[in-house]
Image (spheres, grey):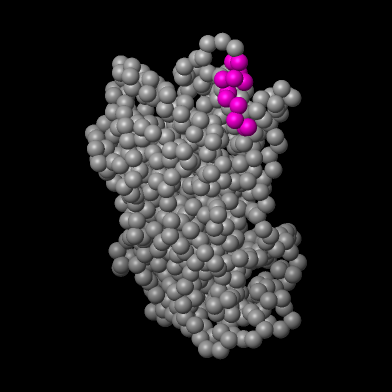
């Protein structure tokens, strides 16, 4: 939209009373309670519907029931765990059987056709960047970017090849890459090393993908390569048997167990391995997932990885005409709803804990393959995200500390950040994309994309609310979050949802607790908020500290400041017009970036309320409202 076509802000001005409707509590009120305009005060005191959630508590791990086994199976599982070879337990008498596969698996998850075409042309295509196959370090000694390492060593590229052309056309490419990898990894290490080639997560995915896409790598005319491949699969399964407990995190261990079970299903004499793997999977998944189904890394990308691993494992059961244990169906039923809670109205993923705006088609394909028919959770309490669906608008609110260091994969200091979309158009976003840094998004931006300033929330003195470390790690900072959610019926405005949350990430350094109140009208036309800084500790600190409240705007939104620098008009691509107003500080428009569904950094703008605040605290009210 051209500058001259912006509606006149003065003609569409939002009353300041609308913005100042949520100040700090006055005497006689609970701290942080909402003060509504005079005509709504009675309605607020006579709420038609109200639901209060108790204050936040620590994450609780899920409790999956054990897979049933008779006494003989339990004895076999115990013996296998103690090191008795599976061949002795399954075939104690008779001729030894060489490695082979017992069934062909139907691939449940199609790959990326464009990446497959690039492979046929001689390149790995990962998040928009091409890496020549001839230059790939298959041994894992020379450092490649993390996304490329994962694709190369997890054999994720097999699905891409499978998606781009008939098998007879792509099998030679698969065999060429496989041959190069086997040559560089001729010897299996005794335990996981520092490189990516033999981490438990990548090894588990490599074995699982090899078994699912076995026709691509075993249908060639090179009988020697076929033999080497089958022996490599058997060696990898034995390596996982010994090392799955040394996984880098619980989710990687879960993938390792899935691969162990798949090998037990598809390779001769695998019954002991399958029984051993099923018991391990239930235990590992219970420790990797919270009791509402969210993985403890709090990453939607990791959530998708867990679902994909279980979907592939179920395909292996189906290939052998064996009914999957009910526990696997229960796991999928728990994992899918939290993922759906972080999608916007257009079906694409929100930008949380390293994720980017994964397209709706990818999400829907994964959910369809899971065979879980469900709706998004309104509040994924233990995972730490609140969702409000208001008319055609969707609000996501991060109301939990970052993941524990031992669980963090792409840990972000995003506590109390939010995203807001209307009719499928993202209005307020987070930058996102730390998990795909190393593609078009440079690796050097990875830590910056995980910082508090890369999220739509408040920062003090340009500091992170939780320390950001290298390699996705998280340090000290937010340790406690309190949350309260209520549904209100407000006279004259209709129903609304009010969420109040606070965190202590700045308490130790600045003696201030950040509290945020968000109120979304049920028709989706208005989001009003208040950011409060509340002093904490016995002795108040003197002086002032700089603050900034950031609202990263969605793509293709044109923003223009009002003359009083207390508001901005937002022209959306769909022709709708929204207005933002604030009461404190100075509003500015600055540059930002957002990582889109193709993992590309897109230039966007951000609204920033900034200034100095007393160590005695302060409050900053703002309003986002659709005009016309």
Q: Over which residues does the magenta segment extend? A: 81-92
The verdict on residue 82 being magenta is: yes
For residue 443, above or below residue 519:
above
Quadrant in the rendering for residue 163: top left
User: What is the tally of numbered marks visible in this picture?
Assistant: 0
Q: Is residue 432 magenta?
A: no
Residue 53 in sight here: yes
Q: Position of residue 264 (x, y in %)?
A: 55, 25
Q: Position of residue 31 (x, y in %)?
A: 68, 76
Task: Give the quadrant of the N terminus.
Answer: bottom left
Could you say which quadrant of the image residue 79 lies in? top right
* Image vertical order of residue 441 relative to residue 227, above or below: below
Quick check: 312 left or right of 30?
left
Residue 375, percent from left and from top: 60, 43
| Residue with the most extreme top position | 94
Identify the residue shown where x is 25% and y is 41%: 135
Q: Residue at x 34, y 40 (%)?
A: 139
Residue at the spot x=57%, y=25% of the render? Answer: 85
Judging depth in this view, the residue of 60 and 601 nearest the camera is 60
Instruction: Using the rendered image of the protein, determine whether residue 576 is visible from the camera's viewpoint.
Output: no
Q: Residue at x 43, y 38 (%)?
A: 189
Q: Nearer the viewer, residue 496 or 61?
A: 61
Would residue 498 appear left or right of 122 to someone viewing this image? right
| Residue 421 x %, y % | 49, 56
Q: Nearer the viewer, residue 421 or 189?
A: 189
Question: Would you place residue 422 above or below residue 208 in this image?
Answer: below
- Above or below, comparing residue 52 to residue 610 in the picture: above
Q: Residue furthest bottom?
A: 542
């Amino acid at each position: 939209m051209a500058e001259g076509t912006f509606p006149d802000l003065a003609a569409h001005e939002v009353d300041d009373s609308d913005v100042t409707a949520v100040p700090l509590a006055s005497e006689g009120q609970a701290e942080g309670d909402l003060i509504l305009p005079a005509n709504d005060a009675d309605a607020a005191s006579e709420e038609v519907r109200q639901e209060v959630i108790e204050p936040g508590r620590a994450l609780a791990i899920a409790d999956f029931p054990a897979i049933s086994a008779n006494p003989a199976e339990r004895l076999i599982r115990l013996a296998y765990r103690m090191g008795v070879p599976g061949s002795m337990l399954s075939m104690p008498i008779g001729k030894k059987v060489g490695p082979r596969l017992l069934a062909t698996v139907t691939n449940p998850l199609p790959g990326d056709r464009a990446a497959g075409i690039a492979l046929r042309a001689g390149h790995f295509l990962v998040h928009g960047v091409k890496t020549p196959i001839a230059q790939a370090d298959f041994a894992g000694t020379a450092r490649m970017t993390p996304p490329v390492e994962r694709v190369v060593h997890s054999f994720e590229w097999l699905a891409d090849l499978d998606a781009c052309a008939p098998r007879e056309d792509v099998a030679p490419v698969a065999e060429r890459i496989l041959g190069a990898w086997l040559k560089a990894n001729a010897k299996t290490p005794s335990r996981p090393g520092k490189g990516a080639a033999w981490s438990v997560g990548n090894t588990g995915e490599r074995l699982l993908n090899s078994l699912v896409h076995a026709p691509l790598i075993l249908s060639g005319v090179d009988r020697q390569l076929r033999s080497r491949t089958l022996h490599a699969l058997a060696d990898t399964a034995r390596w996982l048997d010994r090392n799955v407990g040394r996984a880098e995190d619980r989710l990687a261990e879960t993938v390792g167990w899935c691969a162990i079970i798949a090998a037990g299903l598809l390779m001769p004499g695998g019954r002991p391995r399958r029984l051993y793997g099923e018991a391990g999977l239930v235990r590992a998944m219970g420790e990797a997932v919270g009791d509402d189904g969210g993985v403890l890394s709090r990453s939607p990308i990791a959530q998708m990885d867990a679902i994909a691993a279980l979907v592939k494992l179920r395909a292996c059961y189906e290939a052998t005409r064996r009914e999957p244990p009910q526990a696997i169906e229960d796991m999928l039923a728990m994992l899918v709803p939290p993922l759906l809670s972080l999608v916007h109205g257009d079906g694409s993923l929100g930008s949380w804990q390293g994720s980017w705006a994964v397209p709706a088609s990818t999400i829907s394909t994964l959910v369809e393959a899971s065979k879980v028919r469900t709706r998004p959770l309104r509040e994924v309490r233990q995972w730490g995200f609140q969702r409000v669906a208001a008319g055609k608008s969707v609000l996501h609110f991060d109301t939990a500390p970052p993941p524990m260091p031992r669980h963090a994969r792409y840990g972000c200091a995003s506590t109390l950040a939010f995203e807001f979309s209307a009719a499928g158009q993202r209005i307020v976003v987070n930058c996102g994309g730390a998990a795909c840094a190393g593609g078009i998004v440079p690796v050097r931006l990875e830590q910056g994309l995980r910082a508090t300033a890369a999220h739509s929330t408040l920062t003090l003195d340009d500091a992170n609310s939780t320390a950001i470390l290298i390699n996705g790690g998280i340090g000290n900072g937010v340790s406690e979050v309190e949350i309260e959610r209520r549904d209100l019926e407000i006279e004259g405005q209709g129903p609304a949802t009010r969420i109040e949350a606070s965190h202590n990430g700045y308490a130790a350094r600045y003696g201030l607790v950040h509290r945020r109140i968000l109120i979304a009208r049920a028709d989706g036309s208005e989001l009003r908020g208040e950011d409060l800084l509340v002093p904490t500790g016995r002795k108040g600190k003197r002086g002032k500290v700089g603050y900034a409240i950031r609202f990263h705007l969605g793509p293709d939104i044109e923003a223009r400041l009002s003359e009083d620098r207390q508001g901005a008009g937002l022209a959306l691509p769909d022709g709708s017009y929204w207005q933002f107003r604030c009461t404190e500080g100075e509003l500015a428009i600055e540059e930002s970036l957002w990582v889109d569904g193709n993992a590309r950094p897109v230039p966007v703008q951000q609204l920033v309320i900034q200034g100095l605040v007393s160590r005695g605290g302060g409050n900053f009210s703002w309003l986002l409202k659709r005009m016309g």
